[in-house]
Image: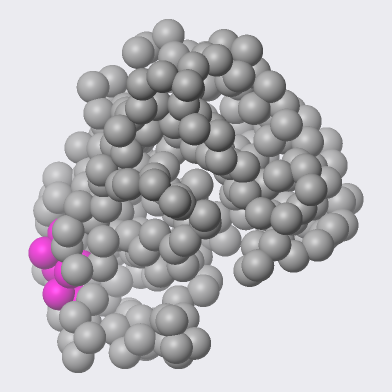
């Protein structure tokens, strides 16, 4: 499995090299549903898919883009239950605008469970990698989720789009934005926000409108670092059935174990944000 992770790391770096020189100089091509798309998204994914297909011909591939611009890419495995999940540029709006918060994400699910993943922060040249049986690293150095309780200095990552299915901000989301107990940070890349939990920088990361490719790679790193990936009610997100998956939303909370209870309390529909230890 380490050999597979090493290959994914090298592949993420090579895809990052393709997009890096075009950052801030690429226009949005079209809109796939609610997703921003550029030619570089497709170039990056094409590069990744070609390498994965050559190296792992029996594995399936699920990617955010397709060349026709009509939906996602999803090829079923020829044998076994391994599916590579790709986000060729997570944080496309940042990439287009010239803001350096975007990542190349490559994850591997086996029977719906994340067993390894790579999140490559392209402009900072930080490569987060790991898996459930592999631990977690950033540029080869071991990382781990926080084990200390949250305090008044603790960071909580949120994605910019916190709207629910009715197009409204839930009361808990509004309460989080209105308080100062948790220090709220928004990077514009769901995967980079999530791996801040694996790196021991943030106690939690909440994404309401993410897709599977936003979390598959990051989840493996988080789990390898001793963190948890659960839905907004507290149930494990994985294993996740891929049967019929066509880009549906996968809301999640990435949490350091010591902060899990406090964060879930914040997510109750009628909750006020509870204080943490000073």
The picture places residue 74, in percent across and down from the top left corner, at 56, 40
Q: Is residue 261 magenta?
A: yes
- Image side of residue 187 versus residue 261, left or right: right
Quadrant the N terminus occupies: top left
Q: Residue at x 62, y 42 (%)?
A: 73
| Circle count | 0
Image quadrant assignment for residue 169: bottom left
Q: Does the magenta stretch include residue 13?
A: no
Colour treatment of the image: one colour
Image quadrant assignment for residue 53: top right
The picture places residue 203, in percent across and down from the top left corner, at 27, 55
Q: Considering only vertical position in the picture, is 139 above or below 229? A: above
Q: Which residue is drawn at 44% across and 31% down?
A: 83
The picture places residue 211, in percent across and down from the top left corner, at 48, 56
The picture places residue 85, in percent across and down from the top left corner, at 50, 37
- Image side of residue 171 versus residue 190, left or right: left
Residue 79 shows in this picture: yes
- In this rendered view, identify the residue nearer to me: 271 or 82: 82
Q: Considering only vertical position in the picture, is 51 above or below 147? A: above
- In this rendered view, identify the residue nearer to me: 206 or 151: 206
- In this rendered view, identify the residue nearer to me: 180 or 95: 95
Q: Residue at x 49, y 87 (%)?
A: 167
Q: Considering only vertical position in the picture, is 158 above or below 39? A: below
Quadrant the C terminus occupies: bottom left
- Image side of residue 141 versus residue 262, left or right: right
Q: Give the range drawn in magenta.
A: 260-266
Q: Which residue is drawn at 42% across and 8% down?
A: 3
Query: What secondary structure characterizes most of the magenta part?
Result: helix
Residue 207 shows in this picture: no
- Image side of residue 32 versus residue 204, left or right: right
């Amino acid at each position: 499995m380490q050999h597979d992770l090493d290959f994914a790391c090298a592949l993420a770096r090579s895809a990052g090299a393709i997009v890096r020189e075009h950052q801030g100089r690429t226009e949005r091509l079209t809109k796939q549903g609610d997703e921003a798309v550029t030619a570089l998204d497709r170039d990056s994914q094409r590069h990744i898919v070609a390498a994965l297909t050559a190296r792992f011909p029996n594995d399936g591939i699920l990617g955010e883009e397709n060349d026709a611009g009509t939906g996602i890419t999803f090829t079923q495995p020829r044998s076994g239950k391994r599916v590579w999940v790709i986000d060729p540029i997570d944080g496309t709006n940042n990439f287009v605008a010239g803001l350096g918060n975007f990542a190349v994400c490559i994850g591997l699910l086996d029977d719906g469970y994340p067993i390894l993943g790579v999140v490559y922060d392209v402009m900072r040249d930080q490569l987060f990698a790991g898996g459930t049986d592999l631990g977690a690293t950033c540029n080869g150095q071991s990382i781990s989720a926080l084990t200390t309780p949250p305090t008044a200095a603790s960071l909580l990552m949120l994605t910019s789009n916190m709207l629910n299915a009715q197009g409204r901000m839930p009361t808990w989301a509004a309460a989080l934005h209105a308080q100062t107990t948790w220090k709220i940070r928004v990077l514009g890349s769901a995967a980079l926000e999530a791996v801040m939990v694996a790196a021991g920088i943030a106690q939690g990361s909440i994404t309401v409108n993410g897709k599977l490719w936003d979390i598959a790679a990051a989840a493996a790193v988080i789990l390898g670092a001793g963190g948890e990936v659960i839905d907004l009610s507290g149930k494990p997100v994985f294993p996740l059935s891929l049967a019929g998956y066509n880009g549906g939303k996968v809301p999640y909370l990435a949490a350091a174990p010591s902060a899990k209870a406090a964060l879930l309390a914040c997510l109750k529909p009628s909750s006020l944000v509870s204080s943490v230890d000073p």
